[in-house]
Amino acid sequence: MKRALIAALLITAAPAAAQQSVASLPPPAIADPQIAALRDDAVANDHYAWDIVEGLTTEVGQRLAATDAEARARDWAVKRLTAMGFANVHVEPFTMPVWTRGAESAEIVSPFPQKLAIAALGYSGSTGPNGITGQIVYFPSVDALRAAPDAEVGGKIVFIDHNMQPAQDGSGYGQFGAPRRQGPTIASLKGAIGIVIRSIGTDHHRNPHTGVQYFTDGAKSIPAGALTVPDAEQLVRILKRGRPVTMHLTLVSEKHEGGKSGNVIAEVPGRDPKAPILLVGGHLDSWDLATGAIDDASGIAITTAAAKHIMDAGRPRRTIRIVWFGAEEPGGFGGNAYAKAHGKESYAIAGESDFGADRIWRFSSQLLKSDPAAYAQLAASLAPLGITKNDKGDADGTDVDPTIQAGAPWVSLNQDGTRYFDYHHTPDDTLDKIDPVQLRQNVAAWTAMLASLSGGIESGAKQPKRR
Amino acid sequence: MKRALIAALLITAAPAAAQQSVASLPPPAIADPQIAALRDDAVANDHYAWDIVEGLTTEVGQRLAATDAEARARDWAVKRLTAMGFANVHVEPFTMPVWTRGAESAEIVSPFPQKLAIAALGYSGSTGPNGITGQIVYFPSVDALRAAPDAEVGGKIVFIDHNMQPAQDGSGYGQFGAPRRQGPTIASLKGAIGIVIRSIGTDHHRNPHTGVQYFTDGAKSIPAGALTVPDAEQLVRILKRGRPVTMHLTLVSEKHEGGKSGNVIAEVPGRDPKAPILLVGGHLDSWDLATGAIDDASGIAITTAAAKHIMDAGRPRRTIRIVWFGAEEPGGFGGNAYAKAHGKESYAIAGESDFGADRIWRFSSQLLKSDPAAYAQLAASLAPLGITKNDKGDADGTDVDPTIQAGAPWVSLNQDGTRYFDYHHTPDDTLDKIDPVQLRQNVAAWTAMLASLSGGIESGAKQPKRR
């Protein structure tokens, strides 16, 4: 079936290709044999990534930004990166406002008394231990809430529904994430005493999806939580009975300034210290509900494993810098701190892995325009892994974005996000969600990308292979 | 592929059939056209079952045995069964010990501090609000715990692991359920201060599977909980690091005697009041973690919808009695109370639906021996729904078992249990897990069974169709 489809496509494509002059075609790119060998070894044999993701999630567990758990994660990171043989392993600290979760519950008081499963959103206001009680006012979208008169919302608990569905490129997260990102502020400005949203997720499990939001435009902080998808659907069914619905909501949390976080940095030093750097990484912190296996232990594991494969092979011309960014979840604090300190350095490329551990299905890069030969070589190196090029792609990633804004060229290796929002920011983001075969495909892709842009790996300077 | 397989099977089977004399073959059974029409109408059009399961789970929610919630469920049941036009709708009350859940948490204190997700098992002892702290001692099975010297267990928190996998017939629940059913008693008798088990489930979500256990053989009550499958796997990984593992366990619960529950009973009166009764039903109570959609709102919905289809068609010779049993989960209290009051009555058949809402794939019945013609007719009526006969099947079902023990002939309509233990006794047992198409197939099968054994439905006496 697949073969038949490909044959059909080739036949269809043939006349158009024939009309194009040979001179206007890009030079044919064939993957460099050294790159192919490194890639193929990684896809078959990598264990570095699994060891990191298994180790970090088991020995540290959840690592909420600016908490003791994240500090333990930094200690673990320094120890592991040093043991793996990387150079210049160090922590660059920064401070930030820290928010922590307390007791949480949501209960329908009337007409049908029952508990619903809920989690507070980041930087939610606190109800205090006794909670608040209010009538639910329903909106099918943020826009519907925005259009509502204040009198309809004042003194009530807003409920925003939506219908997010899975997408390979994760594109629903922008539009359907609005209830979480903007809902609390709009509800607060209209006088609501609290807000609950349908989780920004695509699953049907009783696990709420947390995530960050900020009160902006002078909105005062109010309690804001996410019901699980089944609980949101239950609330919709209850509301459809047409009687007033009253909820008792308890979302206890604390916020204070001066929390301590930091980025953990390590390098594979290049032969040419003046050559622009290859910057890769992911984020070390996680939400507090789970061990953050796919968000984002896998990202730091994949990029670090790839750098390790280059280091095992020899010495690249360019320095590879790995950053395990701190405090991404509450708003990209690590990425901003990094760019403030290092944004003006010279980069050959900047890329991050922060979309799970399922297979990479396509890539895009600024090199398409700035260095078409390098882009073609990269495409040829990635194609055997089933990765297609996306000439319309954009830069992607909270942590490297400020550095890209400061001038670094970007590369995006896009993971298949079909099931990503089943687990994202929920208690279900645990090690068992990672498929080791797909994880290795990720490592192979990043290895091929680093090898392809390394400026050449000199195998004489090879370092001893060690874990 | 399927057709080719069937053709191959027919060819293979042909010689054996040819060797058998025609006289020894059972009489060919062809489904009665009236039965077939009722069945086909139900599979295409039934809405009674969905209305019941949607209504009960939405308007009552969880309904833990002998609590106010279960009492609200009985009120709901009487109202709904009366509105549907059934006769003799009434509640038969009984008393029982009631157990209720309080605060619950499990935390690894050392070597890697982190929270694990847990739920207490039914009739667990209470740790009190301050919890208990102890070293974990690991066993891969109940048998391994049984074989351990008391000194290895005394003063510690036992952890029992296992490897339950999905099975269509749910057969793993017997063997792999032992850690829950027997583990707490054995651990207690050996001097453990508490016990945690890997949930008796086949999913990988952070939702614990509760379920009942009793302390027998003079064992004193100790705290007993189920970790989710991902958390149990996490604990195994932590233990594999080889360092002592300490857990702080909080499982608060209350137990008291004299709780009130009851069975809700309704009938379709038969034309012949002396004819043996057709007894069908499911259980009204649920565990407290979810709305009990598949366990067992769907069971009462399916059997009640089937009885309603018979009633809509006319008046059967035999009386159909529907029982919505109370308090099944904590130990079949409703089934025992029913048999005590009604076990000596005369039954044509007794059957219950209590294994979810996925399609019925096979059936078995005592009629195979006691009334082969009725069995053949039943097989012919069910076959168009894809239901095969199982000549080796047994009686099945906690609630009708005491009545079967008292002499009632049994029928079992077996649902596909492949995904049943993904949700069983967890917070995830919610309406969205029910597939309306498969639910209708269930209703059609029970309708065909009731029609087949009804003794004939006289359509002149048809009642008005109403919800």
Image: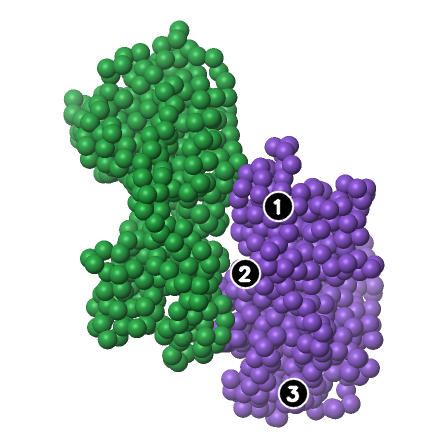
Chain colours: A green, B purple
User: Which chain does the numbered disc 2 sit on?
Assistant: B
Q: Distance between the residues labelled 2 and 1?
A: 24 Å
User: Which chain does the numbered disc 3 sit on?
Assistant: B
Q: Position of residue B103 (x, y in %)?
A: 57, 60
Q: Which residue is drawn at 32% across and 68% down?
A: A193
Q: Is residue A111 above or below residue A276?
A: below
Report the disc number at residue B247.
1
Nearer the observer, A160 or A340: A340
Q: Do labels 1 and 3 share a chain?
A: yes
Q: Residue at x 36, y 10 (%)?
A: A458
Give the label, 2 or 1, closer to the camera: 1
A219 left or right of B248?
left
Q: Distance between the residues labelled 3 and 2?
A: 31 Å
Secondary element at tag 2: loop
Q: Which corner quadrant of the image does residue B401 belong to? A: bottom right
Q: Residues within 10 Å of mark 3 (few under 14, many from 20)?
A: some
Residue linked to disc 3: B90
Nearer the observer, A447 or B411: A447
Report the disc number at residue B121.
none
Q: How far apart are marks 1 and 3 (CA)?
A: 49 Å
Q: Which amino acid does label 1 sit on?
A: Met
Q: Position of residue A55 (x, y in %)?
A: 51, 33
User: Which chain does the numbered disc 1 sit on?
Assistant: B
Q: What residue type is labelled 3?
A: His
Give the label, 1 or 3, closer to the camera: 1
Q: Position of residue B416 (x, y in %)?
A: 62, 59
User: Mark 2 or mark 1: which comes first in sequence?
Assistant: 1
